[in-house]
Structures are given as structure tokens and as C-alpha cells.
Amino acid sequence: MLECIVEGTNIFNPIEGKLDKVIEYFVKFYGEKYRQRIEERLKSTTFLFLGRLSPYSKMTTKTDVNIYFLDKINNLYKDFLNENNLPLNLNLDVKNIDEMLDELDYFKKYGKIYETAKKNFKQIFIFKGFLGKDESASELLKDSEALKVLEEELLNMKALWDKNYKEKLDYLREEKRKTSLVLGEIERDIEEIYLDADKQIENLFKNYFLKHRNIDITSVSKIKKDAYISALEALLSKKKITSKLRKQDCLELFNFLGFNVNNFEELNSNAEIKKLINNKELNLTYEKIRTEMLENLIEKCVYINSSFNYLNSLGLLVYPEAYKSIIKQFIINNFQTAGLTCPTTDEENTLHPLCFLNEFTKLGTETFVHECNHIIATDRVCNDRGEFLGYKTGFRFCSKQYELLDEVVNDYLALKVYDMMKADGFVVGGEKFIPSTYTNAFPLLKNFIEDNLEDIKECLMSEDAFMFAKKIGVENFDMLANAVNAYFDIGDRENIALAYQELKNFDGDLDSVTDTKRLNKNARILNDAIFIVDNLSKTVKKNKENKNIKNLTK
């Protein structure tokens, strides 16, 4: 297993020494009677925390860890500004704050403001009232009385920095330096493949424009090499370009090449530019370089190979190449999948789940808990003769129909466990909380889940794949799953919010089929889903009450 320590945590094994604590949180939520099940499931799971390889954006785990530390450093600077009652919107980037602190060192040593302070401190001077918005900092340096007050305040800032922040910054920078060296060694082959492909692409573009425009593109003075290459690659990808910066790169490049275009729309509709970009030979050669690069990256990627070799050594892989493909897709898909659990068994048919997650700096603790909740709700299902039928995971058993319902309920319960961890300051991942897509359906299902929470928990912890369907009625269960499936057809969080807003503003009768025809499609879907879940909740509640009455009269 790979190792890279970030602030005392191996990013490729962040649960080391923490699994017992994780188990306790789940036992606390589900109940002591399920302890054995929870322990068996989680302790038999092989967790793989995988590095990143993004072929086209060239983002790797080394990049992610650097960003992780830069975010921490930026937050440190923000805390410093906040403690000095300075607004966070001063637009002081890391470099400027570094320069400012250097100036504070000068104050501490010499008791006066160095000349360059007029650049680094101007925003602070204005905010603190020492300087008018349109005044020059140089004039301030001539005002001895104002200067004396200012120096005292700035020296206080320096004392605060030295006391509460300097050591933390030094620590973060040293940690960043050490991990960058470790990951640089791990990703050495990846970096060489990127560099080789970049050189081939640069030469391809250079020779192409020399041939077709008689211009040496590498002599572009206004555009950096990585900018014009990125611009061309964006155009060749045929994907819609939304970035203002990338559009500007494209404009500058093609104006340099002799095309008089004023805006990106003009560039996009220019027939001669289209002909230049759509050249078959150019596109085929470019795609060949990219394909070879991807093949080489996959072949040499230590994150793929070390993970696969580790799994293979455990002897759990019945279909090794299938799992290698899963690892490969997980690592190169740019975090489209936050986590993935595959139920597997050993030769004695004992469950040994495999759980694929991102490494520590790109892993949210809530994602880890979500996958753990899937794991403890998983069972190997056999018929009366002991013949294997499939795996039950929560509400799912060999049917896609119940997948979204299961995911929403799983996420809802997992976040309850996560909230307990959060209250204790217990973390597994270093990524900030990001609500999953499944939380979009919480407004629809929250009341139903809360009303049936104990039954749901019992069913998830049961080996019976159909227990909850039996409890509320198979037809009702199907209606619930179909309502959730329709709800997700509305689209993303924004579309769902718009549909809710339309229902809120609707001036007709939402129970009337005639009136609701005036709603747009998404609002009608939402209204139907709400109607089904609300009625189902009432039906299930009534059935429970009737059952309780019968039990009392026995």
C-alpha cells in the first residue's frame, strides 16, 4: 500500500486506527443489538483510498494535496485578517499578505514604515481610516502623527501574527514541501508521460501553423505557451467553451494568426477558422497523441497498479480484470463517483466487500459514512436450497427500480451518523462537506423517513431483502420507488427548486387534474410525487395504527 503522510495521516489509508471508533458511531445509531453485524461487515471490508489521474486537465493527487495545503494557508490568512477586524474582501492574495508580513518585520526591527508599504498596505490604510480612497500612501509617510499611530497598530498586528499564526504557517509550508516531494516521486512516471505528450502536441501545432499560415506559433508574445495550447485543445475537443479566460486565449491566438475577430462568437462562426480547426489530419494526429498518452498513463499509473496488485494479493478477485477496470475508471473519472462499494465473498461464501474511495484530501467524511452504511446493509441472499441468488443492499435486490430510493434513504441515515461524528470533531476525510445529489430528494421523503425510521433501520439490518416492502405493502413500496424515480427526472437542484417555487406561487387547486395542467412539466412531476408520498405516508401510518389496535384487543 502506498504511503504519503499529510498532517499525521496517510492519505492512502486515513482510517488507520479509526475503524473501531467508526463502528461505535454506527452501533450508537442502529442499536447495540446490531453490533455483531456492523462489526463483521466493516471489519471484513477492504477499503481502498485511491489517488487521482486526470488525463486531460493533468490534475493528479500531487495537485490535489498542494491545493489542500494552499486552502489551509489561505484560511490562516483569513483568520488573521478577521482577528484584526479587517474585511475578507480586501483582495489581499497570498503573495500580497506575504509581502505585508515582510513589511511588518521591517517595522519590528526599525520602527518605521518601509517605502513599499504604500503598495502593500494601501487597502488597510484606507479601511482603518488613515488614508482617503484617492489619496497616495506616500503622503501618509510624511504625516508624523498619523504615522506614529499607524506604526503602533501595525506592530500590534505583527505581534499577533508571531504569537498565533507564524508557527502554523511554517508548519503548513513544511508539510506541503514534504508531501510534494513524496508525491513527486510516486508520480514521476505520470509527469514524464504528460511532458512527452505536451511536447508532441506543441510540435504538432507549431508545424501545422507553419505549413498552413506560414507563422511560427511559438513566437506568440502575448500568449503563453500553455495558454495557446489549451485554447487549441479546447477548440479541437468540440466541447462548448464557457471559460472567459479560455475564450480570450482563443481570440488572442487567432488574431495573432491574422484573423480579424472581435469576439468569440465571431471566431466561432468564421468559416476559415473552422476549416483550419476541423482539418482531418490535424484532428487524427492530435487524437492519436492523446490516446497513446492515456494508454501510457494507465499502464504506468502507480495508483492503478498498486491498488490492483494489493487486491490481487488478498485472493478475493474472482474476475481480476473486471476489478482492474473498475479501479481504472474510478481513478481517471475526475471524481464523478465519490465512492463505490462492491460486495464480494471468499471461498467460504463469507462477505468481504470492497470499497473504493478518494484519498484523504479529496474524501468527504460524509461520503465515507455513506459507503459504510451501504456495507452494513448488505447481505448475500440464497434460496431455501442454499443457492446464491444475489446481493441485497438496503432496499435493493437485483432491480434498478429501487436504486434511487435506496440511495436517498441510505444518504439520509448516513448523514445522521455523520452529524454525530461532526459533533465530536471526528473526521476520516479532509474534504469539506458537499451535499450529495441524493439530498435533493430530502424535502420529498424527510417526513416519510422520520415517521418510519425505526422500521427502516430494522429492514436495513435484516437479511430479508423485501422486509420493508412487506411492512408497508409491496404495491405501496413500488409507488414510493416510482415517485422518487420521477422526482429525479426533474433534474438538478436548481430545476427542483424552480419546480417547488412554481407550486408555491400556483393560484389554482393542486389537487385538481384540470388546474394542474397549467403547470409546466417539472412542476407537474413534483406535484404528483408529493401527492403520492403524502398519501402513502397517511396510508402507512393508518395501517400501523390499525395493527396496534388489533394487537391491543388480542
Image (cartoon, rainbow, N blue to C red):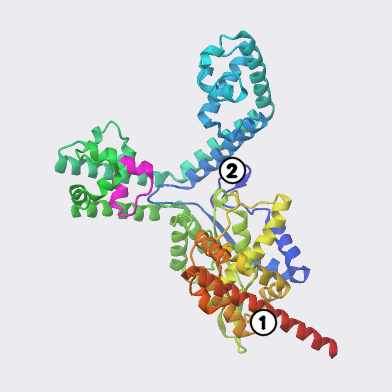
Residue 323 visible to the viewer: yes
Secondary element at image label 2: strand
Which quadrant holds residue 124?
Answer: top right
Residue 107 shows which numbered tag?
none
Numbered circles on residues, count: 2
Q: Is 237 part of what is drawn in magenta?
A: yes
Q: Which residues are magenta?
A: 232-249
Quickly name the residue at label 1.
472
Residue 65, above or below 356? above
Residue 346 visible to the viewer: no
Quickly name the residue at label 2.
6
**What residue sits 57% from the left and 23% below the top?**
126
Residue 476, above or below 59? below
Which quadrant holds residue 179?
Answer: top right
**What residue sits 49% from the left and 70% below the top?**
519
Q: Residues within 10 Å of mark 1 (few under 14, many from 20)?
A: some
Q: Of the residues shown, which amino acid type is indicated by label 2?
A: Val
Q: Of the residues shown, which amino acid type is indicated by label 1?
A: Ile
Which quadrant holds residue 417?
Answer: bottom right
- Labels 1 and 2: the sequence-earlier one: 2
Residue found farthest to the front: 507
Q: Position of residue 49 (x, y in %)?
A: 55, 55
**What residue sits 61% from the left and 84% below the top?**
474
